[in-house]
Amino acid sequence: MRFARHLTTTVPAVVGAALVVLLLSVAPTLAATTPPPQDDVGLNVEVISSSPTSSASGTPTPSSSTTPAATATPTSATNAPVPTGSQPGGSPSPSTIVSPGEEQTIGGVLYVSALTWVYSPSFNPLDGSVDLHFTVRNVYPGEVSGSARFWLTGPFGVPVGQPVEFPVEAIKAGETRLVTARINGLAQWTVVTASATFTPPATLGELKLTPLTRTTLVWYLPWFVLLLAAMVTTWLLERRRRQLRRAAQAGPDQEASG
């Protein structure tokens, strides 16, 4: 009886001690597997707005897609040169530039410049040419057509070369038309008088117009005449040298004979 009473008091104590040991051995495992309680700091750790996805406040615009406010416009197209003259017949001649010089007016609507020239020599002593130029400026509000005539005269009014005449058509309002002609056969005249007449229409509206003539002197070196003069001068000098040499040789001979 005493043993049974001792057993009944010992067994519960042993079982309780075993349960305590079991709980102590399992507690660290339970503590490691149990998730920690979430607090406010843990909630703020998730930074979803830092990703490139769009947010509610607006979508950022990439700087590379910005459209330029304006583009540069090339100015060379507006500064393209415009031909202001024409050859006989009205064909454009942008490469020829002639100073307008002193202008004279026809009825206050057309302005004709001074006559200019360029001489071109030739190996043929009976040839040679001169290019004559003048400009016509139209301030009339409409197109104007006319005609031009060029000719040369030598000393005493002798005609030189062949006159040139042609129409000058459709000079636009505000246009300055270059009128040019070439006359051949200047020969060796040295100085000739060049003349050019521009003949406008007889009337423009209520205006009555008359032809206008410009003149100028053309001079050039007559190379053939200069060549002949040089040859004659050389011959005369050589002749004089021979005469002096013969005179110098004749002096000692006369003294020896005397």
Image (spheres, rainbow, N blue to C red):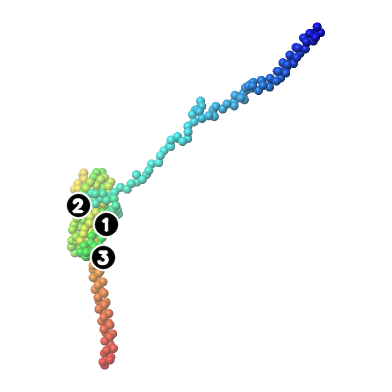
Above or below, 131 against 232 in this view is: above
The residue carrying mark 3 is 221
| C-alpha separation, residue under disc 1 versus residue under disc 2 | 18 Å
Q: Is residue 95 above or below residue 43?
A: below
Q: Which mark is residue 166?
A: 2
Q: Is residue 126 left or right of residue 77?
A: left
The disc, 3 or 2, on the residue closer to the chain's N-terminal end is 2
Can you name the residue that lies furthest to the bottom here? 258
Which secondary structure lies at badge 1?
strand
Q: In terms of depth relative to the viewer, which is nearer, 207 or 249?
A: 249
- In the rendered image of this protein, does residue 70 appear above or below residue 88? above
Pointer 3 or 1: first along the chain: 1
Q: Looking at the image, which residue is at 27% across and 51% down?
A: 93
**In the rendered view, does 48 fall on the left or right side of 109?**
right
Tell me where residue 120 sits by quadrant: bottom left
Amino acid type of disc 3? Leu
Helix, strand or loop for disc 3: loop
Q: Is residue 241 left or right of residue 12?
A: left
The alpha-carbon separation of the residues under discs 3 and 1 comes to 18 Å
Return the residue nearer the eye: 124 or 164.
Answer: 124
Residue type at numbered disc 1: Thr
**Pointer 1 or 2: first along the chain:** 1
Q: Quadrant of the N terminus?
A: top right
Which residue, given by chain and number where applicable, does mark 1 sit on? 116
